[in-house]
Amino acid sequence: GIQVEQSPPDLILQEGANSTLRCNFSDSVNNLQWFHQNPWGQLINLFYIPSGTKQNGRLSATTVATERYSLLYISSSQTTDSGVYFCAYTGGFKTIFGAGTRLFVKA
Amino acid sequence: DVKVTQSSRYLVKRTGEKVFLECVQDMDHENMFWYRQDPGLGLRLIYFSYDVKMKEKGDIPEGYSVSREKKERFSLILESASTNQTSMYLCASSSSGGTAYEQYFGPGTRLTVT
């Protein structure tokens, strides 16, 4: 099955800094989601992005399906951005999650 | 906005009790899912349902059952709770059409079995 790898596993930022999180997949995919899991445990949808680029405020994402990767950009980070970021691919009824990038933004 | 709600944020139960976790979605989604999340193990699929009264086992169904009597509601049942079922439980839903792969999650239930 398709493998999903995320990097870096951990990231510490000073408030205001920018960052790029990466998601690599082992084969071509036709769908991809990015989630933010907040400190209370809820998984919040950030982007559904099978290809191309999307932006939502300080966040943007780009998926290059032919090269098997997706990137999540966080600009001007805030302490509320802390948490774990997951990318995920769904095949049939099974969703494969990456291991996540744990982000801590310092005030 | 899609809204998925779960009946409890925190739950403490005793070993051997029967436990019901409820999940409700308001977007008329056909598909609903139950996951558990444990440190170091990620999210694991317990059961899913693609229609009313239909259910399929996920990767770790042992010790669990589910019920889907109405389209909007998907219940996870722990027939006899055990301490190894202490975990974070997450419910999700998705449509069968359009962006069928886009899942929406509820806030989660942290279950502790003592």
Image: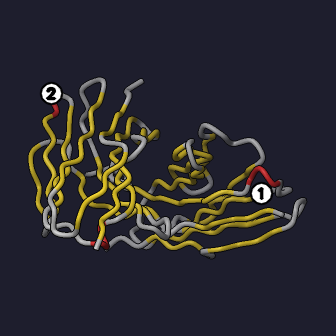
- The chain containing the residue under callout 2 comes to A
Callout in the foreground (1, 2):
2
The amino acid pointed to by label 2 is Glu
Circle 1 residue: B78
Q: How is the image coloured?
A: secondary structure
B47 lies above or below A12: above
Q: Position of residue A18 (x, y in %)?
A: 14, 58
Circle 2 residue: A67
Residues marked 1 and 2, same chain: no
Q: Nearer the viewer, residue A2 or B93?
A: A2
Q: CA distance from mark 1 to mark 2?
A: 43 Å
Disc number placed over residue A30 in the picture, else none: none
State left or right for residue B18 relative to residue A73: right
In which quadrant of the rendered image does the N terminus of chain B lie? bottom left
| Label 2 Cα crowd, 10 Å radius (few <14 / some 14-19 / many 20+) | few
Q: Secondary structure at mark 1?
A: strand
Q: Position of residue A62 (x, y in %)?
A: 13, 46
- The chain containing the residue under callout 1 comes to B
B67 lies above or below A89: below
| Label 1 Cα crowd, 10 Å radius (few <14 / some 14-19 / many 20+) | some
The amino acid pointed to by label 1 is Leu
The residue at the point 77 percent across, 50 percent down is B84
Q: Position of residue B99 (x, y in %)?
A: 27, 51
B30 lies above or below A82: above
